[in-house]
Image (cartoon, grey):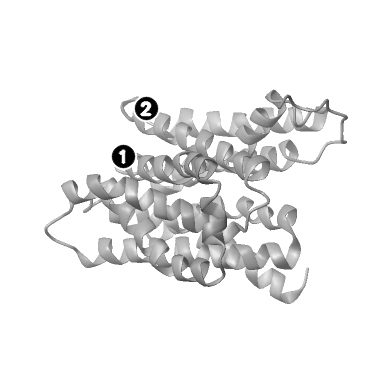
Amino acid sequence: MSKRGWVLFLAMGVIWGVPYAMIRVAVEDFDPVVVAFGRTLLGTLVLLPIALYTKVFAQALQHWRWVLVYTLVEITGPWLLIGMAETKLNSSTVGLLIAGVPLVAMVIVTRIGHERLDPRRIIGLFIGFAGVAALVGLDIDTSNLWAMAAIGLVVIGYAMGAIIIDRKLSDLPPIGVVTASLVFATVIYLPFSVWRMPTHFPADATWSVVGLGLICTALAFVVFFALISEVGAARATVFTYINPAVALVIGVTLLGEPLTAGMAIGFPLVIIGSILGTAKAKAVVKEPAPA
């Protein structure tokens, strides 16, 4: 990997590792739907002019049905649910739970017949889910089970979103799809946000929302596309193994969250399991899907 590739790779690991801490700070003063709305609105304001100038926004809208489905499972639902869950759970715990996305994605693609499970992947899935079980069993109080269920839905949504991009939207310019999704999400959030808009805007919560929109959304996607261009899509996604570590470090050092036994046991198991579980298997011949 080139020097530029390493810089982009490390930048992505940090940029998409910090949102959990920012969300945790923001939801202490703002309703989760307001936080999600602020993030999508700011991301839209930055990316929409770029998408219009490069003429990729209209291309995405031509496939608006699948873009809308992608928006619901990847942005609208997850970003709201994460905010709701972080009113009860530590940001580092949420970051580690979401690290299970590659494992769930692998289960889904094997069920629909696009991939097969070889022994290495099976072992990886068992290890990864054992890590999640350790994290949940040792760290999460039973009174917060609804928050854990919300993150479970987020994990499923993120996994489905990646599959939709790969199977239905891969021929479209990525920035067009992302921008259209942010526009859809902003419109969906708008009426609920107006109803719950705060009367006071504390500095720490406000700046957290600004950071979520400008850094963790707009800048993140620009850097991500540059990384894909530099190293390819397959290698670009490897940075997702760094995100949970960043979320853990920030949560513990900056927010004063505890470093628990569940984290110490679950984190390495989830990462090892994800690496093994998502390792590419040998290609298999598949019959064409029905039209």
In the image, 176 versus 84, the foreground residue is 176
Which residue is farthest left?
Answer: 199
Q: Quadrant of the N terminus?
A: bottom right
CB under 8 Å between callouts 1 and 2? no
Q: Nearer the viewer, residue 130 or 152?
A: 152
First reached walking from the N terminus: tag 1 or tag 2: 1
Residue drawn at x 47%, y 43% is 68
Callout 1 secondary element: loop
Give residue 47's position: percent from left, percent from top: 47, 66
Which residue is at 68% across, 53% downward? 238
Which three-letter amino acid code belongs to the residue tagged 1?
Answer: Lys
Residue 217 vertical placement versus 258 (above, below): below
Badge 1 crowding class, 10 Å Cα cut-off, few under 14, some 14 to 19, many 20 or more, is some
**Residue 46 x/y as whole percent:** 43, 69
Q: Residue at x 60, y 62 (%)?
A: 224
Can you see residue 265? no
Q: Quadrant of the C terminus?
A: top right
Question: Looking at the picture, which amino acid does disc 2 mark?
Answer: Leu
- In the rendered picture of this protein, how many numbered marks are placed on residues? 2
**Measured Cα–Cα span from mark 1 to mark 2:** 10 Å
Residue at which label 1 appears: 88
Look at the picture and state if 279 lies above or below 252.
above
Query: Image point 72% across, 33% down: which residue?
Result: 124
Find residue 191 and report its horizontal and vertical position in percent: 23, 46
Residue 171 marker: none
Image location of residue 141, percent across then percent down: 36, 29
64 or 153: nearer the viewer: 64
Residue 186 left/right relative to 102: left
State the mark number for residue 145.
2
